[in-house]
Image (tube, coloured by chain):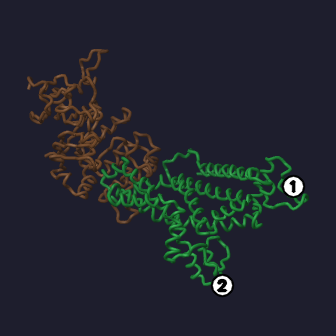
Chain colours: A brown, B green
Amino acid sequence: MPMLDIKNLTLEIDTGQGMVKALDKVNLTVNSGEIRALVGESGSGKSLIVSAISGALPGQWRLTADRLSWKGESLLSMTAEERREVMRRDIAVVFQNPVTALDPSATLGEQLEEGIPDEFVEGSWFWQRKQHRKKIAVSTVHKVGIKYHKHYLSAYPHQVPTDICQKFMIAMALVSQPKLLIADDPTRGMETTTKTQILKLFTRLNQTKSLSILFVSHDLLAIASMSHTMTVLYAGQTVESGKMKHLRKRPLHPYTKALLDSAPSFRTNLPPKSTLPTLEGTIPPLQHMPIGCRLGPRCPRAQRDCVVTPVVRRIHDHTYNCHFPLHMEKL
Amino acid sequence: MITILTRYLTLFVLTLLVLAALSFSLAYLFPGDVLTNLSGITPQNEIQREALARQYKLDQGYFFQFIHYIGQLLSGNWGYSFISGLPLRDEIGIAMPATIELSTYAMLIAIVIGIPVGYYAGMKGYTTADHTINSISLFSYSFPVYWLALVFILVFSLELGIAPLSGRISLLFDIPNVTGFILIDTLLADGIDRGLAFRDALHHMVLPTLAIAIITTAAMIRLTRRSVIDVLSRPYITAARSRGLSRWQIFSRHILRNALLPILPLMAIQITTLITNAMIVETLFSWPGIGNWLIQAIYQRDYPALRIGMLAVSTLVITLTILIDLFNRLIDPSREKYERGTV
């Protein structure tokens, strides 16, 4: 049974010229103990999904879903208090921009310590509890690969380099020992060595603590090496979803294929100095979303039927939304 | 820390020097005799004139005159009033505290009421409660202060007769000027019924204080509300919510401080308005403060008094502005250590 189960999540935003569906019937599941990658171009709605799960959307946006549940309990029908409890203990989120997601007027140490659930803190007197909090904070900071905890715990966010801020965000997410970690582009702005370090940390936590991770990124190389399953998003629609190795070997949706082809490291037979294959055009702006399959105008295989939104089709645990999928003859 | 203090001290001293230069040049710019404008004494004959000119170094260049002028200011010799013939220092010593007292109470009311109400409105952003508070504050912010004071006099003093019309305290009480703050002085005075005097002073103070405080409070509510709404939309509040912190934790740890920080510099701007308002209200209530005193000086063309009055009021404003900015700098960790001080 999936831990996080999202079915037909639709998010409507008022742009001033009527409501626009920023997310259109998105499906996403995260099973216990798996690393799921959520991939898509910038503006495809990845971060909106993260906000929808964490309940951080502005009130005037309309969110509807057939299912948005955590361990079988609907997040949408919960009381605010219950939802807060889920967010406090079970789900942790690493937001995209670490510098703005940290309070500029509090030290990093204070912000890290306030996230520690009271149940973890031992000691009956406040000074003992304070000391223990500090200990937990220091060990968490070491875990994410920050060495000089003395310096950084008492520093303010603006005094600290961006990658350290990002690591602090990860530390804050991990300090409550969550069951699901939602990481929204956690390795952005990091150099390769730090990136590898963070990805290794995620993999290790996944293996030893069976932490489920929803890894949101457009860094295909990083995703391919660590995640088990992948969901591809295009312009607010789920395009294809399935096991990583199936998707890589035999993508069914033309967009998935284009996405994988555009990453040179996946191509073994790429001749030198050849142009990389890309789709014509750009991702459409929110006000001018095409009807039906939103990839339609850019899709090399588009036909008249594509003006009707394709329904979800399923082959084993591989789902895709396309009228004219690739590789069908081989299946 | 020491660098910051030095920066602000330099800024303060330089600004005061510019103000002193301005006040000095007024002696030349005002109509009439320079010597009379500077000293406040009209020489009776040539011998006295020459003696005074020598005393004020008018026989030397402008620069030395200015240096001497600053020396005189620092030693407390501010000249004499044309009209009363009293030393200006003593007159300002009585008038200035009266204004400061009025402004202080108005500011206290504005802070005690305005900031919490502003926080409440901001936290309830865009609901009926918020809209109600916002429109009331906008409404009262748009009153001209002299009109409001006149309406108060008309309603409370003349129609209802529940508040005294003018002055600081009933003439029955003889209060010696110790601190300059009437409420404290009544408690220190000897030989009178202190409780009665205190109540009488309070009674006199209500209307002028309210007239100023209403406008300042409205401004404070609006500043605070805006700042809180601004902070609420920041990503770190979203992030704090997603960590499952309670509403109270988010408010006390993240919103309170971050919303207060941008209010402080704006408060410094409000102080100028506050003192101007206080000076207008004083005139209407015959409150013996600096505003009333300056108006009288203008009516009577008391040039030495105007020269010193301008210097005294601007020094007060500059001092408060710089102090608030310094305080803000000291408590705001995100402000750069090497940022320059500003007035």
User: Compared with residue A218, is residue A99 higher up or lower down, i.e. above or below?
Assistant: below
Name the residue tied to disc 2.
B191
The disc at residue B54 is: 1
- Measuring from the top left, give residue B21's x and y in whole percent: 72, 50
Chain letter for mark 2: B
Image coordinates for residue B173, horizontal then vertical, percent: 64, 80
Q: Residues within 10 Å of mark 2 (few under 14, many from 20)?
A: few
- Give the numbered dot on residue A190: none
Residue B200 makes an appearance in the image: yes
> Which chain is indicated by disc 1?
B
Left or right: B336, with A67 as reference point: right
Marks counted in the figure total 2
* Residue in the picture at 73% in, 64% down: B88
In the foreground, A11 or A99: A11
Q: Is residue B332 left or right of residue A140?
A: right
Q: Indicate whether B212 appears above or below B58.
A: below
Q: CA distance from mark 2 to mark 1?
A: 47 Å
Q: In the image, what residue occupies the spot 32% across and 44% down? A: A94
Of badges 2 and 1, the one in the foreground is 1
Q: Amino acid at mark 1?
A: Arg
Above or below, comparing residue A172 to residue A203 in the picture: below
Of residues A76 and A34, the one drawn nearer to the viewer in this rendering: A76
Q: Position of residue A192 (x, y in %)?
A: 36, 32
* Vertical placement of residue A181 versus B270, above or below: above
Q: Amino acid at mark 2?
A: Gly
